[in-house]
């Protein structure tokens, strides 16, 4: 019997987490320890499908609203100074619940 070729997991299309499965939200990009280009960067956040809103906080700055598209949440960040940063996202649901991502540490290059 011949087996159908299945591409490795990393090559498969990524789907956003499912709230029913109890999956936690996560910052997908930048990766932990990654160096991003200065000036402008777009963070990508995975969240449970029933999320009503997602916001990102970089360092001690304000919570920045994200936009939804292609099954993920996106946060555009500009005027980035070179240095070390931390980011965290929070997800809000219609029933008032909130979930936080783990802290993500990364750098902005020169």
Image (tube, rainbow, N blue to C red):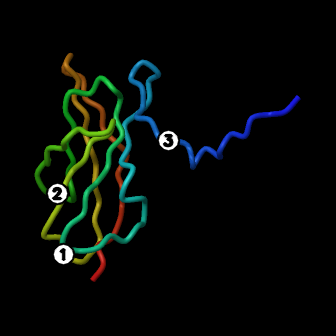
Q: Residues within 10 Å of mark 2 (few under 14, many from 20)?
A: few
Distance from disc 2 to disc 1, alpha carbons, whole Å, reads 15 Å
Whichever of labels 3 and 1 marks the residue nearer the N terminus, that label is 3
Between disc 3 and disc 2, the foreground one is 3
Percent across and percent down for residue 36 are 32, 70
Upstream in sequence: badge 2 or badge 1: 2
Q: Earlier in the sequence, mark 3 or mark 2?
A: 3
Mark 3–mark 2 CB contact (< 8 Å)? no
Q: Where is residue 100 shown, x and y percent of the image?
A: 30, 38
Where does label 3 land, which residue? Answer: 13
Above or below: residue 14 compared with residue 84 = above
Locate residue 91 relative to residue 64 in the image: left or right.
right
Residue carrying label 1? 81
Left or right: residue 12 versus residue 35 is right
Real-space Cα separation, disc 3 to disc 1, in angstroms: 33 Å
Q: Are marks 3 and 1 in contact (CB under 8 Å)?
A: no
- Element class at badge 1: loop
The mark found on residue 60 in the picture is 2
Please determine whether, in this image, residue 69 is positioned above or below residue 37: above
């Amino acid at each position: 019997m011949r087996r159908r070729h299945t591409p490795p997991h990393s090559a498969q299309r990524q789907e956003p987490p499912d709230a029913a499965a109890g999956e936690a939200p996560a910052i997908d990009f930048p990766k932990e320890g990654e160096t991003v280009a200065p000036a402008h960067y777009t963070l990508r956040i995975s969240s449970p499908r029933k999320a009503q809103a997602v916001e990102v906080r970089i360092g001690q700055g304000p919570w920045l609203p994200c936009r939804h598209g292609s099954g993920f949440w996106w946060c555009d960040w500009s005027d980035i100074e070179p240095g070390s940063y931390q980011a965290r996202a929070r997800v809000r649901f219609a029933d008032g619940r909130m979930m936080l991502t783990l802290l993500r540490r990364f750098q902005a290059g020169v």
